[in-house]
Image (spheres, grey):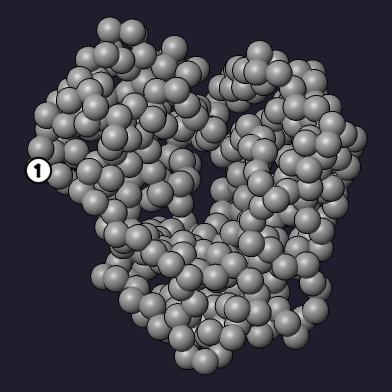
C-alpha cells in the first residue's frame, strides 16, 4: 500500500470495559486532558514523520470522542503542517455511544474527521452491562444519525461475539440491528481474553464462563452471513465493508506500511523497526515535558521476520497476497522461502494460488489460527 499513517492514542475513559487491556486513564479532568494533548503535539514535533504522503490519520483509544473538537483540529493541523497529506486521506475518530452530540460531531467534521468508528459492541442491554459499557443501543442509533447529519459519510460499527452469557440469537440480533443502520464498514471481533482484565479474573474464578468453540464458530459464521447479505463484503477475517470503504488504517498495518504512533502505549513502524511508548500517563507526560521521546522499547525485525509477517498478515485478508509484491519487496520468490509450507497446506486444501495471488481457502479461513504460525521463521525453516 502506497503512503503512510499516523495513529494518535487518546487514552481517556469514564469507565474501563471488563475485557479491556488497552493503555487508558480514567479521568474527566479537562486540565489533565489538555496537558496530554499538548504532549502529543510535542511528541509529533520530535518524531521523524517520513516522506509521506499520509493516507490515514487515526484517533484511537481510550475514548477519543471525549476530546473537544478543537484538540482534534490542533493535532490534524500539526500533522498537515509537517508532512504531505493525501487529498483523500482517511481521518478516523473512534467514538463511544453517549459521548457525542450533534455539536461535537459537527466540530469533528469541521476539524477534518471524515470517518467515525463507533464502538457499539452489542445491542442487548444485559451484555453491555456485563461488558461495563456505559451506554445503551439507542445511544448508538443516535450517534449514527448525528454522524450523518454532520456530513460524515463513512461510518464503522464495532461488535463483539464470544462473550460470556452471549447466545447465538444475541449475536444475530446485534449484527442485524447494526446492518439496519447502513454503515459503510462493520468490524466483528471475537472476544480475546487478555491478561490483567476484569473479565479474565472473573473467568479464572468461575464467575463467568466462556462459550465453547463450536458456539463461537457458529456466532462468527452467522455474523458474517448477515453482514454479507447486507452488502458488506468481508475483506479481512474480522472486517466487512462496502466497495471502496475498506479501512486504510487497517490496511496500512496488514501490508507493512510505515506509520507513526503518538501517545501513551502507541506503536510506530518504519518498515523495519517497531517501537512502542510508555503506557502510563505520568511517564508519558514526564518524558515529553522534559523534551524526550516517550519510547519504552523497540525491536529491529530481521529479513526473515519481515517476510513471515508479510505473509501471515496478508493471509488474514480475503484477497491474500500478490507473489509479485513479495518478490519486489524481498528480492526472492514466495516459493523459494515458503515452498514446503505452501505445498503442505495446498495438499490439505487450506490455501490456494490463482492469478499470481496466494490466499486462504474457505476451509483455511475456518482454521486460520492453526495455519498462520506455519509461516513463522522457525516453522518455515524447519520445513525448508
SS at mark 1 in the image: loop
Task: Give the residue drawn at x 44%, y 12%.
Answer: 363
Task: Give the residue drawn at x 60%, y 78%.
Answer: 283
Callout 1: few (<14), some (14-19), or many (20+) C-alpha neighbours within 10 Å?
A: few
Q: Is residue 121 visible?
A: yes
Q: Quadrant of residue 94?
A: bottom right
Q: Residue furthest left?
A: 331
Q: Position of residue 172 (x, y in %)?
A: 74, 21
Who is closer to the viewer here, 39 or 183? 39
Who is closer to the viewer here, 165 or 206? 206
Q: What residue would you read off at disc 1? A: 331
Q: Residue furthest bottom?
A: 290
Q: Position of residue 5 (x, y in %)?
A: 40, 61
Q: Position of residue 92 (x, y in %)?
A: 55, 57
Who is closer to the viewer here, 179 or 277? 277
Q: Quadrant of the C terminus?
A: top left
Marks counted in the figure total 1
Task: Give the residue drawn at x 34%, y 27%.
Answer: 374
Task: Give the residue drawn at x 30%, y 67%.
Answer: 52
Q: Is residue 124 visible?
A: no
Amino acid at each position: 500500500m502506497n503512503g503512510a499513517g499516523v495513529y494518535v492514542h487518546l487514552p481517556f475513559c469514564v469507565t474501563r470495559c471488563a475485557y479491556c487491556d488497552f493503555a487508558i486513564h480514567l479521568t474527566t479532568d479537562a486540565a489533565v486532558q489538555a496537558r496530554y494533548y499538548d504532549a502529543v503535539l510535542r511528541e509529533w514535533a520530535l518524531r521523524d514523520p517520513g516522506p509521506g504522503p499520509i493516507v490515514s490519520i487515526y484517533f484511537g483509544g481510550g475514548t477519543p470522542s471525549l476530546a473537544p473538537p478543537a484538540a482534534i483540529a490542533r493535532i490534524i493541523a500539526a500533522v498537515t503542517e509537517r508532512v504531505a497529506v493525501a487529498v483523500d486521506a482517511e481521518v478516523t475518530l473512534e467514538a463511544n455511544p453517549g459521548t457525542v452530540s450533534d455539536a461535537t460531531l459537527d466540530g469533528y467534521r469541521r476539524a477534518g474527521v471524515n470517518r467515525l468508528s463507533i464502538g457499539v459492541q452489542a445491542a442487548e442491554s444485559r451484555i453491555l452491562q456485563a461488558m461495563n459499557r456505559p451506554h445503551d443501543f439507542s445511544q448508538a442509533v443516535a450517534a449514527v444519525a448525528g454522524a450523518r447529519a454532520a456530513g460524515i459519510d463513512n461510518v464503522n460499527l464495532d461488535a463483539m461475539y464470544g462473550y460470556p452469557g452471549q447466545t447465538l440469537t444475541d449475536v444475530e440480533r446485534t449484527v442485524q440491528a447494526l446492518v439496519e443502520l447502513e454503515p459503510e464498514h462493520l468490524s466483528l471481533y471475537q472476544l480475546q481474553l487478555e491478561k490483567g482484565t476484569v473479565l479474565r479474573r472473573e473467568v479464572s474464578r468461575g464467575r463467568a464462563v466462556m462459550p465453547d468453540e463450536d458456539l463461537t464458530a457458529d456466532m462468527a459464521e452467522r455474523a458474517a452471513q448477515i453482514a454479507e447479505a447486507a452488502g458488506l463484503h468481508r475483506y479481512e477475517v474480522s472486517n466487512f465493508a462496502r466497495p471502496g470503504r475498506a479501512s486504510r488504517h487497517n490496511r496500512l498495518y496488514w501490508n507493512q506500511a510505515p506509520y507513526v504512533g503518538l501517545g501513551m502505549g502507541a506503536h510506530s513502524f518504519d518498515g523495519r523497526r517497531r517501537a512502542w511508548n510508555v503506557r502510563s500517563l505520568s511517564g508519558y507526560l514526564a518524558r515529553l515535558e522534559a523534551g524526550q521521546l516517550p519510547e519504552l522499547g523497540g525491536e529491529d525485525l530481521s529479513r526473515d521476520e519481515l517476510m513471515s509477517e508479510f505473509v501471515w498478515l496478508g493471509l488474514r485478508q480475503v484477497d491474500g497476497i500478490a507473489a509479485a509484491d513479495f518478490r519486489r519487496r524481498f528480492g526472492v520468490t514466495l516459493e523459494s522461502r515458503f515452498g514446503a509450507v505452501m505445498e503442505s497446506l495446498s495438499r490439505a486444501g487450506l490455501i490456494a494460488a490463482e492469478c499470481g495471488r496466494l490466499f486462504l481457502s474457505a476451509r483455511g479461513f475456518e482454521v486460520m489460527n492453526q495455519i498462520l504460525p506455519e509461516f513463522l521463521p522457525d516453522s518455515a525453516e524447519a520445513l525448508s
